[in-house]
Each structure stands twice: as C-alpha cells, then as structure tokens.
Amino acid sequence: QVQLRESGGGLVQPGGSLRLSCAASGGIISINDMRWYRQAPGKQRELVASITHDGTTNYADSVKGRFAISRENAKNTVYLQMNSLKPEDTAVYYCNANIRTSAWSNYWGQGTQVTVSS
C-alpha cells in the first residue's frame, strides 16, 4: 500500500527557512509528477509547486523566488525548500504524487503544519 510521509514542518519566524520532505513507499514501480499543496485555515487547498520526473518545475506566483522544489528519484522523495518565509505562508502542507503500482493513481500525504510567526 502506497504511503506518502511528510516531515520538516514546524514553527519559524518571518524571514526564516524550512525544508519539507516527502518520502513515498509501498510497492512503487514509477512516480511521475510530484507536487506540494498547502491549505490555510478557511481557505481552499492551493498548488504551491510541482516537479516532473525529469526535473521540470513550476511554482505558484506567491512563492516564486522564495521556494524551491526538488526530488531524488532513487529515494522516491520530494523536497520543498522554503526561504524568506512570511506569515501568509502559514498552512498545512501536503505532498501529492502520481504513482504507478499495478496501475497509475494519485496519492496524498497526511500533511505537515508550517507556522510562520514571531
């Protein structure tokens, strides 16, 4: 059974940095796109960044120049380096991926809380 496990969230002051990790496991044959979403209280879940298997990236305008998504295919792991954090980045961050086991399916992690506050 496929699992996506996020780690690295926490409390950080404005201007600080955090690095999120998400490791996929469980009968995986292949992973194509991997993504990070976030959901702040009272708001809809939004796409923050995505990365293809060959490393092509895309970012939401609100995080361009501050966040960087990367992946290690050999470890089935995706990262989100978050710099110059702002209070408005406070949210639960979710990992998402298209994964092939016996068939292609879309999977979500359980989420990790990021709080930016002084």
Image (tube, rainbow, N blue to C red):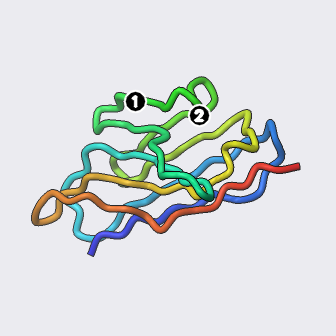
Residue located 76% across and 49% down the image:
116
Residue at the far left: name it. Answer: 102
Left or right: 105 with respect to 83?
left
- Residue 101: percent from the left, percent from the top? 17, 64
Residue at the far front: name it. Answer: 42
Residue 67 is tagged as 2
Residue at the far top: name it. Answer: 65
Lower position in the chain sequence, tag 2 or tag 1: 1
Whether residue 34 is situated above or below residue 29 in the rendered picture = above
Residue located 56% across and 52% down the image:
43
SS at mark 2 in the image: strand
Whether residue 110 is situated above or below residue 8 in the rendered picture = below
Q: Which residue, given by chain and number where applicable, does mark 1 sit on?
A: 57
Amino acid type, residue under disc 2 in the picture: Phe
Q: Residues within 10 Å of mark 2 (few under 14, many from 20)?
A: many
Amino acid type, residue under disc 1 in the picture: Thr
Residue at the far bottom: name it. Answer: 1
